Amino acid sequence: MVPAWGGEVSVAVAANFTGPIQVLAPLFERETGHKLQAAFGATGKFYAQISNGAPFEVLLAADDETPARLLKEGQGVPGSAYTYAVGRLVLWSPDDKLIDERGEVLRKGAFRHLALANPKTAPYGLAAQQTMARLGVLETLRPRFVQGENIAQTHQFVSTGNAELGFVAYSQVIKNGRIGGGSGWLVPAEFHDPIRQDALLLHKGRHNPAAQAWLAFLKGDAAQTVIRSFGYELPR
């Protein structure tokens, strides 16, 4: 039963989760009567904005460290943090012949530019760096890096040809359960630290029923089906 009137919740959303939010927001509105106002960006940037008093009520981070830090600093509601998705990293190019299924292209180096998100502010960028370190190509490839502020900008660099290939979120290129268009290598999860993405009810949203409803909705079957369809794993 949808309430006759609904509230509104302001959510800071990690850029990699843009696709799922576009599907989830109307579902949430239909189910609860509440509206979701989303802002998309790098988790590190959101941390700075929230620390400086930005009016966000919920954070959907690209990591689990930022919500933990905000909790420690009194910006979040104790006991409200949980992992809503586990991200997957993919090396992707719009060129359907460039990337082989084991990522050997990184060793062969038949490209000029490689895009990745800023490892200091974007967990997917850090995962990309860890992957290259594991493969022993990090220092060799460093001069070719084109660095995006967040994973959305990184994807843009690759899709517009400013870099021939790049490390992006699987959620950005998945179509019907596989990489749609171009070529890609789904990086094995053990090549980098798990990309555990945590949600947090922020101090500003503690008395807002719409904020609480949104966090409850995200844990539901309908939302989890959508999240899985974008290539994320769900915590066990």
Image (cartoon, rainbow, N blue to C red):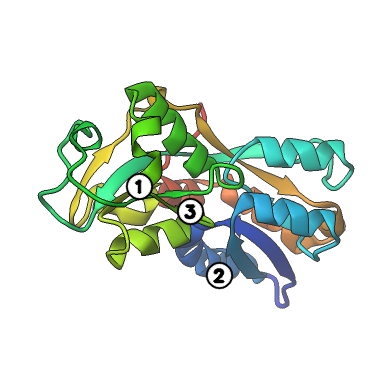
Residue type marked 1: Arg
Q: CA distance from mark 2 to mark 3?
A: 24 Å
Badge 2 or badge 3: first in the primary sequence: 3
**Residue type (three-letter) at the residue carrying disc 2:** Arg
Q: Is residue 25 left or right of residue 79?
A: left
- Reply above or below: 36 against 130: below
Q: Which mark is residue 30?
A: 2
Q: CA distance from mark 3 to mark 1?
A: 23 Å
| Residue of label 3 | 16
Q: Position of residue 143 (x, y in %)?
A: 38, 44
Q: Is residue 149 left or right of residue 191?
A: right
Mark 2 secondary-structure assignment = helix
For the N terminus, the quadrant is: bottom right
Residue 30 in view here: yes
In the rendered structure, which amino acid carries the disc numbered 3?
Asn
Q: From the viewer's perspective, is the residue at label 2 or at label 3 nearer? A: 3
Position of residue 200 measured from the top left corner of the image (x, y, whole percent): 72, 46
Q: Residue 24 at x, y = what percent?
A: 50, 61
